[in-house]
Image: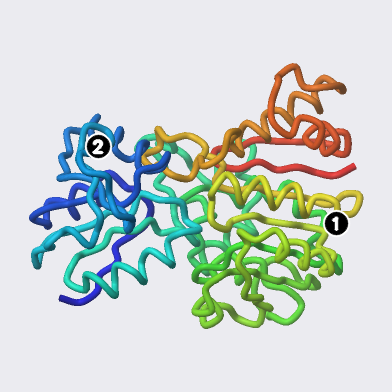
Amino acid sequence: MKYNIKGKGYSLEELKTFMADCNNVYLYGTGKVALKLANLLKENGIEWLGFVTTLPNDEGKTFFDHNVYCIDDINFEKNDGIVLAVAEKTHAEIMSIIKEKRKSVKIYQQRIFGRTINIPVGYLKGADKEKGFFGRFQELNKWGEVFDTDKHHKAHDYLRKYELFLQYYKEKEFTLLELGVFRGGSLNTWGGIKSDKGYFDKAKIIGVDIDPACCQYVDKQEVIIKDLGVAENLEELKTLSPSVIVDDASHFCSHQIMALLVLWDVLPSGGIYIMEDVDTSFNNVGYVGFNDTIISAYDVCQNLAECVTSGGESRNDIPMKKQIEVIASQIDMISFIHGSCVMIKK
């Protein structure tokens, strides 16, 4: 059977469909991600046969009341399946091992880079791009519709809010750095000095992504291929001297937090940092595995907001407290919208 990868995050409906199409399904992994996914499946009455790893297993070992098997000890049938339930940094290695050892098995994998999060049904019910306070901000949203980015009002509805802040830069010469490219919708929406389309006329637009295939989707914007889960790669991006940074990359909390900690310093006074998809900090949106740290990306932003509001220290005993307080002391304004956090530097 063809080596098969299915994705777009741990969508419950997709998991149900994938698992219903398989005879026997195993979850790969026995860590925190596996535990969260197992809980999600159990809560929704979805059954699986057990857990698998690539390591030899102690006889009788169990996890979440299921047996744990070494992948070499399982005789997979033609229509069996594996759902990856491990951290993103191990995916490439594990996928190559499974491909080599068990070519017939079907695989369900999180769609990591450029993944679209489904907005809960009814959340934007009745929303009208022409109405409300943000109805006056239509130009950036219009370009978002042209290039079919999920940032426009029919999806996340980010752009009408962003324009309130980004209009300041519309005619200025500056660099916008976007982490995550996927299919180029937002890079093309930004436009830039090399493009005759898009919102910004004089900006240098640069996107960074791990997948070289993303280059085919952009117009004339620059694309850099780097793994944004590596701190050294983020450090190298400082030389670009961006005035606006948009983090729409892996959506893993660990990556979101690391990018903020590394890149915040490079922003000039008046610079804007946008952290998108912070709703991955909450498992109740139907996805698990993205909140992979002891403190979530949302909790970092929330504590930044507390320090900005109080003008002092955070009241909470949290990891990276001093780093959060230092960044907060440099924030002129912090604003939350559904799924996104906007920070403006003093």
User: Is 287 placed above or below 19 here?
Assistant: above
Q: Mark 2 points at which residue?
A: 62
Decide which of tag 2 and tag 1 comes sooner along the chain: 2
- Distance of label 2 from label 1 (alpha carbons): 48 Å
Which picture quadrant has residue 229? bottom right
Judged by depth in the image, the label closer to the viewer, 2 or 1, is 2
Give the image location of residue 202, x and y in percent: 81, 73
Quarter of the view holding residue 242: bottom right
> Outermost residue, top direction?
315
Does residue 265 appear left or right of residue 255 in this picture? right
Q: What SS does tag 1 mark? A: helix
> In the image shown, does 76 or 201 lie closer to the viewer?
76
The residue located at (77%, 53%) in the rendering is 262
Query: Residue beneath label 1, please?
Result: 266
- From the viewer's side, name the closer residue of 70 and 113: 70
Q: Which mark is residue 179?
A: none
Q: Position of residue 209 (x, y in %)?
A: 59, 69
**SS label for mark 2:** strand
Going 81% across and 28% down the picture, which residue do you hit?
308
What is the total number of numbered labels drawn onto the structure image?
Answer: 2
Residue 49: x and y, percent? 15, 45
> What type is the residue that disc 1 sits on?
Val
Q: In this view, does 181 lie to the left or right of 268?
A: left
Q: Which residue is drawn at 47% across and 56% down?
A: 88
Q: Relative to 166, is 302 on the left or the right?
A: left
The amino acid sitting under disc 2 is Thr
The N terminus: image quadrant = bottom left
